[in-house]
Image (cartoon, grey):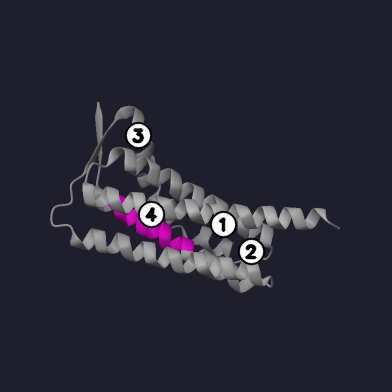
Amino acid sequence: MSNVVSSTNVLETLIQLEQNGYKFYEEAANAMEDGVTKNLLLKLAEDEKVHEKTYRELLERQDDISDITFDEDESYLNLIVNLNAMVTDEGKLEKTKKVKSKREALLIAEKLEKDTIIFLNELVELDKDIKRNKAYKAALKEEKNHLRQILRRMMDENIGSLML
């Protein structure tokens, strides 16, 4: 049995993920005293704004937005799209404004990037539309780079704390 998910919903979910990402990064950066972490978060915020613009343009440019069909066992994609209400949950976003420590900010950033990477990986596998697939692959590469930067910063922080 096959399932179908609207490409419009997928792109709108990606837009919302990027918006939540840059809002979080900006809020977290404002709470940071450490210049290195603050600069990283501000850079990530700017990158997420570019990603959002890319998805918006992709959504607006398409004359015929085809749906994505996938097998029952690949319903993970549908779950993520159906969780769009959670993605846009303002209560969760409000909690991120209370982030004060570098560790907490970096842990949330790591989760945001991993969630987006998982979603994009699924899309690359399932969506056969060439224009969208190119955009997904480019975004996936950038999100992986974001995750590398975050993990590198986390390692630097851990190494620094071990050297009393």
Q: What residue is shown with label 3? A: 75
Q: Considering depth in this image, is 90 or 79 the residue closer to the camera?
A: 79
Labels 3, 1: front one: 1
State the image quarter where residue 104 is shown: bottom right
Q: Earlier in the sequence, mark 2 or mark 3?
A: 3
Start-end of magenta stretch: 9-21
Discs 3, 1 touching: Cβ within 8 Å: no
Q: Considering depth in this image, is 163 or 27 the residue closer to the camera?
A: 163
Q: What element does badge 2 sit on?
A: loop
Discs 4, 3 touching: Cβ within 8 Å: no
State the image quarter where residue 15 is shown: bottom left
Query: Which three-letter amino acid code belongs to the residue tagged 4?
Result: Ala
Q: What residue is shown with label 4? A: 139
Q: Residues within 10 Å of mark 4 (few under 14, many from 20)?
A: many
Q: Earlier in the sequence, mark 3 or mark 1?
A: 3
Q: What residue is shown with label 1? A: 149
Give the main secondary structure, helix, strand or loop, of the magenta stretch: helix
